[in-house]
Image (spheres, rainbow, N blue to C red):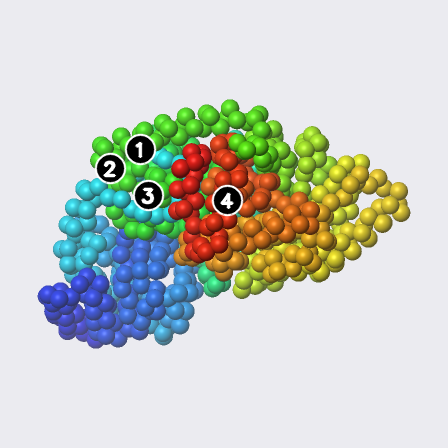
């Protein structure tokens, strides 16, 4: 096709589209890509626009799946399109999927397209986005095609900055001068005042083919060694070495770095002729494509971890030292604003300067949220559209209690939040004074407050928090940290050390809860569509009795002469207790026959987290010595709402009538059968929820060590009988969330929540 006619046709049609008075910005972009695809005889024409943080968003497309528009996001420099934007160069690939930098996104449906021509949309030297055409056939686009696309991109750029398309031009600059409040989701409690810094983590790979493959392989090996060392240093961070879910997250993250399959794929990519940097990018893109094909949100969270790890490795290869990120422009009161980020990326920032975090993606169960909680950094997630509405250096307030972000706040708002910060600091000092005081309500009800743990390093927090014991010791962490299955002697030594450090306080060992999102690299795991409700926990233990019996043998030896409490996770039917007890009895009999010293007392409990077992309580409770509610899983299963999925996590409230009735029923059944009852999980660690649990009959809780102070303050200000009467009344006819009525009671009764 001659250049001039094609270009004239496109220019004329673009002028017609932009002159239509009724068309909005999105409608104009849709028409533009449709016209370009038609004139260029392309199967696909797409327009990606650049965001504040350097990422690219698919704004319009003819040919790709419509649902991908405004959903597909490319990190800075990611894939061929990101490479085009970052380097400002035309990219003409006959078979794009075979290019080392290709990044496949399954939601677009682009796997059937081969050839790709991408040109940067630029104005005054600034890249605004990328215009792309694709075809099913494998072909190299002609020089004439490239000239048409480049000229078209220039015209599109003029329309973008003219304000004709929403999100660009003068309108956005005006909006950046105004105060605004963005409502999100609180993911780490606290309040922070500071100034915006945009998170831009990605290194753009510019050289793809290696001059010296041997030297590149050596660079890769050195970088991998430095990566592993830096992760070991990260886990010894003074704020991260203790107990909490963040240990699970970071240990699993470190396990990724030691994955032999990942290392093998990196080496093979270098041996194929790529630079070490390009090898990391190719493996990252390939693994991302596989993970994003999985429907379960677990794999999307793991994909974020892998992206974080790959970006970290790229920084090492580029000569940027790992450790604290402390650029000259990082304010001393930095509030980090990001589209999304991995857990280790957050740790890389200088904690003495970092005050808060806001991310557009991610829920309270995301890995970066869990680490933010461990670091004590106030954070808000689901702050949709914030990146485009802030500029580096803007004043900003993060309210991790209400889930609000105040950008360019007025002096009155700043003063109000300054007072809130001072008040919270005073309360924290009050919690420290409560450490050695008993958790007793005003009407004399004694409440046991225990902590959750999973590693020997967690044990000092028992004394530091004033906890009454370990209500949940996650034995699977040792297995997740090991490169091979821990043998009996090693397990025995580890469990013995935990009991010694407990100094006579009770310890509940949860048997292996692996499967689901806890993968052991040395055990073959079959991919599952719904791993959270798949082959995991007691189901795996009963199907692999040798693995279960090995752990029981180690626990029996470790607790010689002492009380031993073993809790079995994810019991769904009462008869599973019979199967598990039979295996435990075999190990007890074997140890006795061999003359091995045995525990002075053996207590076997069940974890209540599968709703079905709530309807077999009269069958289950005679079979157990104690039960513990795993509130996190029980709530998501009761509501059929994945707690790691931000789209549904806020659709239910744990203080709704349905779950409270279920928990009251459980407490009543345990009282009738004289079975000890505990609750471990997030409900236990939140004062308002813990108050309700006391009203339902719960008297023992297990939580993160940091939660003991606020919960104890609530208990000492509470009349247990009054909240029991309140809930009895509310649950008679109540439905839906009861939170407002419960909070009103707490305020009236002057309960510290």
Mark 4 in CB contact with mark 2 (< 8 angstroms): no
Name the mark nearer the viewer: 4 or 3: 4
Q: Quadrant of the N terminus?
A: bottom left
User: Which of the 4 image quarters holds residue 562?
Assistant: top right
Comparing 47 with 480, the one in front is: 480
Q: CA distance from mark 1 to mark 4?
A: 36 Å
Q: What is the number of the mark on residue 404?
A: 3
Name the mark nearer the viewer: 1 or 2: 1
Q: Is label 2 in a helix, a strand or a loop?
A: loop
Disc 2 marks which residue?
Answer: 409
Q: Is label 4 in a helix, a strand or a loop?
A: helix
Q: CA distance from mark 4 to mark 3?
A: 34 Å
Disc 4 marks which residue?
Answer: 725
Name the mark nearer the viewer: 1 or 4: 4
Q: What is the number of the mark on residue 417?
A: 1
Of labels 4 and 3, earlier in sequence is 3
Q: Quadrant of the C terminus?
A: top left
Comparing 436 with 305, the one in front is: 436
Q: Is residue 56 left or right of residue 619?
A: left
Give the x, y percent position of residue 7.
16, 69
Q: Is residue 750 visible?
A: yes
Q: Is residue 311 left or right of residue 517?
A: left
Residue at figure coordinates x 74%, y 41% from the top left = 564
Residue at figure coordinates x 41%, y 60% from the top left = 103
Q: CA distance from mark 4 to mark 2?
A: 43 Å
At label 4, counting other C-alpha atoms closer than 10 Å, the crowd grade (few under 14, some 14-19, many 20 or more) is few
């Amino acid at each position: 096709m001659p250049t001039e006619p094609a270009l004239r046709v496109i220019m004329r049609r673009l002028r017609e589209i932009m002159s239509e008075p009724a068309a909005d910005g999105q409608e104009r972009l849709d028409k533009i890509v449709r016209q370009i695809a038609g004139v260029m005889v392309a199967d696909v024409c797409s327009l990606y626009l650049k965001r504040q943080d350097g990422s690219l968003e698919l704004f319009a497309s003819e040919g790709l799946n419509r649902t991908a528009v405004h959903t597909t996001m490319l990190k800075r420099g990611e894939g061929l399109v990101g490479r085009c934007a970052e380097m400002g160069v035309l990219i003409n690939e006959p078979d794009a999927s075979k290019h080392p930098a290709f990044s496949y996104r399954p939601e677009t449906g682009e796997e059937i397209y081969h050839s790709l021509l991408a040109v940067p949309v630029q104005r005054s030297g600034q890249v605004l986005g990328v215009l792309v055409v694709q075809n099913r056939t494998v072909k190299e686009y002609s020089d004439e095609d490239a000239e048409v696309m480049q000229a078209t991109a220039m015209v599109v750029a003029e329309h973008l900055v003219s304000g004709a398309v929403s999100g660009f031009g003068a309108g956005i600059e005006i909006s950046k001068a105004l105060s605004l409040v963005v409502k999100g989701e609180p993911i780490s409690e606290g309040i922070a005042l500071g100034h915006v810094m945009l998170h831009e983590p990605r290194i753009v790979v510019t050289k793809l083919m290696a001059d010296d493959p041997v030297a590149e392989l050596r660079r890769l090996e050195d970088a991998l060694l430095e990566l592993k060392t830096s992760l070991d240093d990260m886990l010894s961070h003074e704020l991260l070495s203790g107990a909490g879910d963040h240990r699970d997250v970071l240990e699993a993250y470190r396990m990724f770095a030691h994955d032999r399959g990942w290392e093998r794929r990196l080496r093979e990519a270098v041996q194929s002729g790529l630079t070490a940097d390009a090898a990391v990018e190719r493996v990252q893109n390939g693994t991302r494509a596989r993970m994003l094909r999985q429907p379960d949100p677990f794999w999307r969270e793991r994909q974020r971890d892998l992206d974080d790890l790959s970006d970290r490795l790229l920084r090492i290869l580029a000569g940027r030292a790992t450790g604290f990120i402390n650029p000259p422009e990082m304010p001393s009161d930095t509030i980090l604003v990001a589209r999304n980020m991995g857990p280790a990326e957050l740790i890389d920032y200088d904690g003495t300067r970092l005050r808060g975090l806001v991310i557009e993606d991610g829920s309270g169960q995301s890995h970066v949220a869990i680490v933010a909680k461990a670091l004590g950094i106030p954070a808000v997630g689901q702050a949709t559209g914030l990146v485009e509405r802030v500029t580096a250096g803007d004043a900003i307030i993060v309210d991790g209690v209400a889930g609000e972000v105040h950008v360019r706040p007025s002096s009155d708002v700043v003063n109000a939040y300054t007072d809130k910060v001072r008040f919270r600091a005073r309360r924290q000092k009050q919690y420290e004074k409560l450490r050695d005081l008993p958790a007793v309500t005003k009407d004399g009800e004694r409440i046991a407050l225990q902590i959750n743990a999973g590693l020997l390093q967690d044990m000092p927090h028992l004394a530091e928090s004033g906890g009454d014991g370990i209500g949940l010791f996650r034995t699977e962490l040792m297995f997740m940290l090991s490169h091979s299955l821990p043998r009996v002697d090693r397990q025995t030594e580890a469990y013995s050390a935990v009991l010694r450090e407990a100094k006579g306080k009770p310890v509940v060992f949860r048997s292996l809860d692996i499967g689901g999102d806890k993968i052991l690299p040395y055990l073959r795991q079959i991919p599952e569509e719904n791993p959270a409700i798949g082959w995991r926990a007691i189901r795996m233990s009963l199907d692999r009795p040798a693995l279960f019996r090995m752990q029981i043998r180690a626990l029996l030896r470790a607790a010689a002469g002492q009380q031993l409490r073993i809790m079995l996770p994810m019991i769904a039917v009462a008869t599973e207790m019979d199967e598990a007890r039979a295996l435990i009895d075999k190990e007890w009999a074997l140890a006795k026959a061999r003359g091995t010293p045995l525990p002075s007392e053996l207590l076997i409990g069940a974890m209540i987290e599968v709703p079905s077992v709530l309807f077999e309580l009269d069958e289950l409770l005679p079979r157990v010595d104690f039960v513990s509610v795993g509130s996190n899983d029980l709530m998501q299963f009761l509501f059929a709402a994945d707690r790691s999925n931000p789209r549904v996590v806020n659709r239910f409230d744990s203080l709704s009538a349905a779950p409270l009735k279920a928990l009251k029923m459980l407490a009543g059944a345990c009282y009738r059968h004289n079975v000890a009852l505990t609750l471990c999980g997030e409900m236990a660690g939140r004062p308002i929820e813990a108050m309700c649990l006391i009203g339902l009959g719960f008297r023992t809780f297990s939580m993160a060590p940091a939660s003991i102070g606020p919960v104890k303050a609530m208990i000492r200000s509470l009349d247990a009988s009054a909240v029991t009467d309140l809930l009895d009344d509310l649950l008679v006819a109540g439905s839906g969330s009861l939170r407002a009525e419960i909070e009103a009671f707490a305020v009236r009764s002057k309960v510290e929540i």
